[in-house]
Image: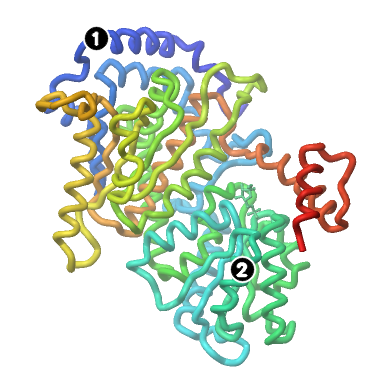
Amino acid sequence: MPLPTINPTQTQAWKKLQKHFDQLESTAHPFKNADKRSQDFAVTWNEFYFDFSKNRITRETLQLLTELAEEVKLKEAIEAQFSGKKINRTERRAVLHTALRDFDSMREEVRSTLEKMKTFSQNIITGVHKGHTGKSITDVVNIGIGGSHLGPEMITEALKFYKTHLNIHFIANIDGDKVAELLRELNPETTLFIIVSKSFTTQETLANAEVVKEWFLKAAVPENIATHFVAVSSNIEKAVAFGIASANIFPMEDWVGGRFSLWSAVGLSICCAVGYTHFESLLKGAFEADKHFRNTAFDKNIPVLMALLSVWYNNFYKRETEVIVSYSQYLEKLIDYLQQAVMESNGKSIDRNGEKVTYETGTIVWGNVGSNAQHAFFQLLHQGTKWAPADFIGFANPLYDENLHNHAILMANFIAQTEALWEGTKNRFVEDNHRVFEGNRPSNTFLIKKLTPKNLGSLIAFYEHKIFVQGIVWNIFSYDQWGVELGKSIAKTTLQAIEIEAINPNQSPYSNHLLSEYFKMKN
Ligand code: F6P
């Protein structure tokens, strides 16, 4: 068995944690001595300062949470993942996105794909690679969805400061209006399309790629496809059948899951967006985080702490959601990215023994950038009945030298909000109940020196490892996603009904009623 199959609620640590939780909740002021807590509950690592002092924990909580990690055999599980055991049992696959950034002992297939990405992206950026009429490429369109979209788009946005002259676009949604809008802007002579699909069977991606190919062929001949279309896939046969020359296919390994694939050839649009050197720095940042994760004691291990705190709130405080607020507009796509990474991974209710779990698993992740979010949902965080643990992410230095005062205001808000959440109005005079802030609303603070490709790589890798640790504790399989299949297959039957404009008696009456109304309304 490559992964342990321990029910966390049956461990000694869980029982102790439950007792400890009850005690904490019945103590008047359990989280005293802010000075000491600030020192005790923080980790300094590379250009990161991870402050987790404003959490509903004491030394004892931390001790018991790390005991839980030991009892569920986290250490063994980490080694099983890194050493390539088939830990994704329901798909019979290893999980090795960490091998894509292992610069100490890089696999040959990883190195050669990186080489190919480097040469190709450099040729596009420098104009060595020309379009079919001899003009340089100005626009790159990534066609893909889910993991074949969210990572590249998030990183491209986050690293805009480091961008090349190329314009990068993303087509993910099957919504034809969105595709039409983009194609209006583009010139087929100067656009490169990257079709990204691990399976090369995803309905949205294939339909969008066909639309784009048809649009392209209005201005070019089939032989020109080789100059304007490349694919990233593990299904070479299907990509070739679509019309992509085999030399233009960037391989994806079976052991890279879609939502963990931005480090693979899926990152080709990132290479075009920011240049290969920055892409490599991103990988190196993730590699540093991998080493920290693998080699650091649990009570100083950033992703392990992130995961255990999240388990503490999810399973003992019964918090269903967690909020992430980045004090950088560049990180505006982080939530979209993490929603897939976290919820597709840990939104499971069958354990590794094949039994229905009797405890809560994956959290709901939401959020936005600060300070915008303060003027939107923060009221609920501060005074609502549904408090949620929060991650605050901020950068000590801005990227531009202009507008330094803006950055000071941004950072003031970043720090002030975590104080307001935790301290509330405990030490302030308050006129009436409506102005009371109870406090004790927890948050982690990630203070990072600067938004560089390397630091971003580390940050994303921390969240990846957090997801893994939680999956281990909850005794679920984090790396499959069977929950997306049923809807896909019903959509196929429904599409057939729509195409012949006749309802299918085997489909649910709910859908057939809707289809009848739809047929009446359309045209
Ligand atoms: O939505 C399910 C899913 O399989 C994701 O896990 C994946 O990232 C996405 O679809 C796209 O898959 P592919 O890269 O095979 O097109």
| Of 356 and 299, the residue lying toward us | 356
Residue 41 position, x and y percent, is 23, 29
| Of 467 and 493, the residue lying toward us | 493
Examine the image and state in which quarter residue 198 appears: bottom right
Task: Please say if 238 is above or below 415.
Answer: below
Tell me the residue at 43%/13% (across/down): 14
**Screen quadrant of the C terminus:** bottom right
Q: Is mark 2 within 8 Å of ligand 1?
A: no
Tell me the residue at 24%/52% (across/down): 395
Q: CA distance from mark 2 to mark 1?
A: 58 Å
| Of 325 and 122, the residue lying toward us | 325
The circle on residue 27 is: 1
Task: Please say if 283 is above or below 225.
Answer: above
| Of 87 and 504, the residue lying toward us | 504
**Residue 238 located left or right of residue 1:** right
Q: Dot 2: few (<14), some (14–19), or many (≥20) neighbours within 10 Å?
A: some
Q: Dot 1: few (<14), some (14–19), or many (≥20) neighbours within 10 Å?
A: few
Of tags 2 and 1, the one toward the viewer is 2
Tell me the residue at 49%/81% (across/down): 138
Is residue 174 shown to the viewer in this render? yes
Q: For mark 2, what is the residue?
A: 179
Which amino acid does the dot numbered 2 rest on? Val
Residue 511 position, x and y percent, is 77, 42
Is residue 53 shown to the viewer in this render? no
Q: Does the residue at mark 2 contact the one at mark 1 (Cβ under 8 Å)?
A: no
Residue 2 position, x and y percent, is 59, 29
Examine the image and state in which quarter residue 112 appears: bottom right
Residue 105 position, x and y percent, is 46, 51
**Residue 389 located left or right of residue 494:** left
